Each structure stands twice: as structure tokens, then as C-alpha cells.
């Protein structure tokens, strides 16, 4: 199927599946809606910092990716997005069973897509916000041959 | 040896070795100096984004960690640091053989340590800056029992 | 009245009145609630950029101040706050009659207060979001003699 | 003279002169070079925060403008720049006689120009860094009729 006509969620799932970093984090794509995407992952033994909490880099990866796919839902088919910049505030250590990252589009311009996101840690059914982000995605042509 | 009297580089190497996320990225601690730290890692097959470049999350992980250890060199022994916030601008795709992340302290206050950093990608002996960061570390007491 | 026992809104109004920068912008303090503050100002002839829109610096000033007072509502009386860092994304030019800046606390910790905010431009009764921010306030002791 | 052929510094001086916000701050354009711009201003009675230091909004205005003109030096004549986003870390209160803001281009791409900057406060001939920034400028067509 041509990428330009393939339904949005299928395109995003196919793109998600090509990201080996997300497989390394055992991340799953949990929700895709217009201007919104949710990705989650377990807190793995292999993505910890020195005190056993999840590494900020794993938290960043999840929410940056969720924000990127949120942006992708609002641009023309056949175009990709890239993170131009992202700012993360870490509110609490990443402790618990699972991290759930939500990305949302604040403003989708032709040249810049401004996004926000948050990450919650889930532990025994309770959640706690551990990070918030604000950043900018830009639409890019897919690499030649992709 | 007590952490408070252990030489700085040994303490940082021991802390680095406890971060499973860095082992997952096959990162190495290449340089520790006062207010400065260099960490590098190969561009691995398992940390890619959908077009085969390194994932922004891996780039972030390396430079956030380098900035954190740069901050750690300037605070009292027995204290740890945590990232309060970090802002990354991605300048070019992470393509090449190896990523080299440098973190440096701009201002070490009693309560906040302001840092900057950059990541270069090395390919066939040439380097290209792919990301810059600016952020804030805070000194924290080590977790009880650590 | 002692600053430590003076009601919150009175303290914030008194502080606001001491900021000559806000008088220069003809800003008004429109709302103070727990963890939230709204400040607005007309788009003045004397705070423009080169094409006649409001200068980003005026937009920043309003929302940084609103975020600071939002933080102040959640810390012990007698303590002040200072902006440690603030990140602004500008979404649209500041065009219209009036700018309305809202600051809100996302997480009030003992050492760091993480805030978000937005600025809307009002024109002929319609509003449009022109900027969003995410940043960090820190509690500080008032300067000696203050 | 046509803006597209007018020498760079003249164009920037003319643009600077149209920004009423900079006149309000009594700012001067002190240096323009390729990828670099320096702007300074006295610490005025009318741009203070509640304790008499310079307001963060004035500091932001100066360095945002310096970074914008630094970017402008590297784009085609006849094009303008706009701040897409800017992140400021405030290191010390703005105390002294004069603020000197320097903006520099880190990477000038076709669509995004990544910048850094700093502000120093000068007091009795000594300087102290009070703020650093990192952000993104975008080239834009001048408004119709400009």
C-alpha cells in the first residue's frame, strides 16, 4: 500500500515497528488520535540509572516519540516529522511498573508543530506524573529510498 | 572505601557502572575533569529510529548523563545530582560510527548547577555536531541504603 | 502588617506594585488563585518589534511574572520566588488589543516549583494563543532589608 | 535603497530602530558580525522587579533580540527572522550598571537557525554572567507592505 493513502494508524504502527530503540525499551503504541499519541513501556532492569530508578533518557525517549507521532497525525501523508527541540522537566524519579507517555499537539503550523507531553509512572494501579515536555517538531521529506 | 573520601573519578566510574541504561547503550566514560565529562557510545542497531539514524532518546541519554557527571565533579562528596530539566536542540540526524557527548558546568550554585553540553557524531574520523543542550542539575542526598 | 501573615492576594498585589517593569508594560494583576495567576496588558506602542507586533520580550515578561506569582501562592509566607529557567514557544505574532498571560503550577516541590503558562492575544473580543511556556521557579529568602 | 542589497549592518540598524521595545529599554546595537550580535542597555529604574534588580523580561528581551540579529546575518537579504522558541537559564540577579547581551548562531539551516546567547551584567568595570539562552529562529518573509 502506498504510504500516502495508507490509513494513519497503520502508517504510525509501521513506523513504530521500524524504531529499534522502542523495541529495546519494549514500548507499545497504545493510542493514536488526531493530534494525540500514547506510548508506554515497562520499567526494565536494563534502562535504569545508578539508584535503580528508570533513566531520564528512557523517559525522554518515550515522550519524545509520543509527541512526534502526535504531530505526524496532523501533517500530509507521505511526510515525516523530526524533533527540532524538546524541553523536559523531571518531576519525580521514574519508579513503578510502567511508564505511560502522552504527546499532544498544541499548534500545527505548516513549518513547525508545537507539542506538549507528559509521562506518568504507574505503580500498583496508581499513577504519578514524573515528567512534562514542551517542544517543536518539523515536517520533513522521508529519506530517499525509504 | 567511604564514598565521601573516594577519589572523584573512581566514584563517578562506580556510579556509571551501576547505570544499566548506559550498559544497554554500550556507553563508555571517556573523560572526567573539574566541571566537565565526556561519554561516548557506538551507534547501535538496537537504538535506531524509523529511518536508521540513532534515536534522539539515545543522544539525549548520553549528553544528559555527561552533564550530570560534570555537575557531580563540583559538589560535595556524598551528594548525588539529579536532572531537574534539560533542553535539547537536535541539529542533524545521528548518523555515523559513534556519538561523543560532552557535558560542562556553566554555573555551580549551592542549589542549582546550570550545565551545557553537545553531542558530535563521528564518521570515518570526521565529526559533526548533532545536538546541543542546556539544563539544570540539582544536588540530592543519595537514597537511603545506597 | 507582617508579610508572613498578610493575606496572599494582598502580598502579591504589593509585590506586583513594586515591579516597575510591569508598570512600564501597563500590566494588571487580574486573578490570583491557589497555584494560578493571570496578568494582562495592552499591546502598547512602546513595546513593539520591527513590524509592529508586540515584542517577544513583553510576552515573556507577562507570562514569566504570572508563573512566578502562581508559584508564590504555594510556598510559605515570607518566602519569595525567582525564575530559575523558562522556555517559551512563540506560536503567533502578538497582534491585537491586549495580551492575557496565565501561569499555573504543575508541581510544587520543596526546592523547585515547576510551572506552565500561556499567553493569548485578544482582538475584538476573540482570543488566540500566541505563546506557551514551561519552566522552574525556586523559593528564595527575601533580600536583606526588604 | 532596496532592503535586498542594502549592506547587512545598515539593514540591521534600520530594523533595530523600528523596535520600540528596544527604545523603551534604551538598548544600543553594539556589534554585528557574521553569526554574532551584541546589544546592551542600562539597568533602568523602569524595568525592575520587586526587589530592585532588573526584570528577567528585560534580560530576555535583550538576548532574544541579539540572537535574532545574529541569525539574520546568515540568511538571504530580504528575509526576516522570528523567534520560534527560546530557553533561558537565569544565573544571578540582574544587578549593576549595564546588561550586555551576546547572541551567536550555532547552526544555520535552511529552515531553522539554532542560536545560543548570554547576558552579562557590568558593574564598576567588572562583569558577571547572569543568563544563558538556547533557542531557534526561523526565516520568514517580511509582512506584506513592510
Image: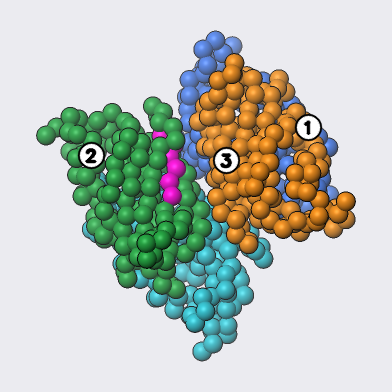
Chain colours: A green, B cyan, C orange, D blue
Q: Which residue is mark 3?
A: C117
Specify the label residue B118 is tagged with. Answer: none
Q: Position of residue D58 (x, y in %)?
A: 70, 38
Q: Position of residue B7 (x, y in %)?
A: 54, 82
* Magenta segment: A113-118
* Residue B126 visible somewhere in the drawing: no
Look at 75% across and 48% down and name the residue there: C8
Q: Nearer the viewer, residue D16 or D49?
A: D49
Question: Label 1 lies in what chain?
Answer: C
Name the element at disc 2: helix
Name the element at disc 1: helix
Where is B35 relative to C31, above or below?
below
Look at 31% across and 31% down and name the residue there: A75
Question: Label 3 lies in what chain?
Answer: C
Residue A102: within the magenta? no
Look at 54% across and 33% down and name the residue there: C131
Q: Which residue is mark 1?
A: C23
| Mark 1 residue crowding within 10 angstroms, few (<14) / some (14–19) / many (20+) | some
Distance from disc 3 to disc 2, alpha carbons, whole Å, reads 31 Å
| Mark 3 residue crowding within 10 angstroms, few (<14) / some (14–19) / many (20+) | many
Name the element at disc 3: strand
Look at 66% across and 53% down and name the residue there: C74
Q: Which residue is mark 2?
A: A9
Amino acid at each position: 500500500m502506498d504510504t500516502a493513502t495508507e490509513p494513519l494508524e497503520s502508517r504510525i504502527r509501521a513506523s513504530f515497528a521500524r524504531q529499534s530503540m522502542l523495541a529495546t525499551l519494549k514500548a507499545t503504541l497504545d493510542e493514536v488520535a488526531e493530534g494525540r499519541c500514547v506510548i508506554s513501556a515497562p520499567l526494565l532492569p536494563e534502562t535504569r540509572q545508578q539508584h535503580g530508578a528508570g533513566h531520564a533518557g528512557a523517559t525522554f525517549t518515550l515522550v519524545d516519540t509520543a509527541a512526534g507521532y502526535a504531530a505526524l497525525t496532523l501533517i500530509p501523508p507521505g511526510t515525516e516529522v523530526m524533533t527540532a527541540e524538546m524541553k523536559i522537566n523531571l518531576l519525580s524519579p521514574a519508579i513503578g511498573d510502567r511508564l505511560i507517555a502522552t504527546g499532544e499537539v498544541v499548534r500545527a503550523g505548516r513549518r513547525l508543530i508545537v507539542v506538549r507531553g507528559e509521562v506518568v509512572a504507574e505503580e500498583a494501579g496508581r499513577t504519578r506524573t514524573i515528567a512534562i515536555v514542551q517542544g517543536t517538531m518539523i515536517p520533513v521529506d522521508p529519506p530517499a529510498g525509504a
